[in-house]
Image (tube, helix red, strand yellow):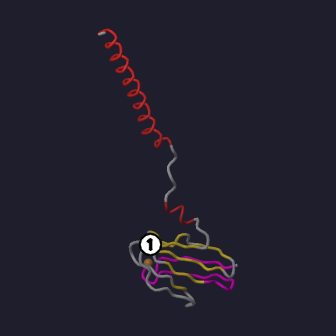
Amino acid sequence: MPTNLMGRVLAVALGSAAILAMSAELGFAQTTMPMQMPMKPAQQQTVAATPNAMFMKNFNFTPTDLTVKAGTTVTWKNLDGEPHTVVNDAGLFRSAALDQNDTYQFKFDKPGVYKIFCGIHPNMRATITVQ
Ligand SMILES: [Cu+2]
C-alpha cells in the first residue's frame, strides 16, 4: 500500500525532526548554562586563606601578616617560577632557595613578632605574630 508507506515515512521524518529539535534545545541549554554560573574566585584568594601558611606569589609574601598560636608550624610555599627564601631578621631560621612549589616549615614555640624577608629579593617582607 503506497499511501500507508508514505504515512510511515512521514511519521518517521516528523519523529526525527522532533528529536533533532530536542537535542538542539539541549545543546543550547548546555552551552548557555556555564555562562550563567558565577566565576570561580582567583587561585590567589584561595591559597591566601589557608591557615598557618604563607605563600610566595608575584614576588610578595601572601599574606604579609600572619598570626598563629605558640607551638604552630608555619608552612611557606613558593608559587613563583623564580626561587625565593625565607629568612628571619633575628637569624632564628633561614631556608634554602625554594623552587616553584617547594615548601619550608618552621615551628614557632615562643610568642613574639617575627619579621621575615626573602634573601634573594630583600624587598619581599612579612611578619609572623605568635601569640
Ligand atoms: Cu624572593
**Left or right placement of residue 114 versus residue 102 in this view:** right
Q: Please tell me whether residue 16 is drawn above or below residue 66 in the rendered image.
A: above
Identified at 43% across, 29% down, the residue is: 22
Q: In the image, residue 8 lies at what x, y percent?
A: 35, 16
The range drawn in magenta is 107-130
**Left or right placement of residue 5 versus residue 48 in this view:** left
**Left or right placement of residue 51 versus residue 98 in this view:** right
- Provide the secondary structure element on which disc 1 rests: loop
Identified at 49% across, 41% down, the residue is: 36
Depth check: 105 or 119 in front?
Answer: 105
Determine the image quadrant of residue 89: bottom right
Residue 118 lies in the magenta-colored region = yes
Q: Quadrant of ligand 1?
A: bottom left
- Is the CB of the residue bearing disc 1 within 8 angstroms of ligand 1? yes
Query: Quick one: which residue is furthest to the front in this view?
Result: 1
The N terminus is located in which quarter?
top left
- Residue where numbered disc 1 is placed: 59
Q: Please tell me whether residue 41 is drawn above or below residue 119 in the rendered image.
A: above
Q: In the image, residue 128 lies at what x, y percent?
A: 61, 78
The amino acid type found where label 1 is placed reads Phe
Identified at 50% across, 53% down, the residue is: 40
Depth check: 92 or 101 in front?
Answer: 101
Q: In the image, residue 44 lies at what x, y percent?
A: 50, 63
Q: How many marks?
A: 1
The C terminus is located in which quarter?
bottom right
Determine the image quadrant of residue 64: bottom right
Crowd rating for badge 1 (residues with CA inside 10 Å; few <14, some 14–19, many 20+): some
Residue 97 lies in the magenta-colored region = no
Q: In the image, residue 47 lies at what x, y percent?
A: 53, 65
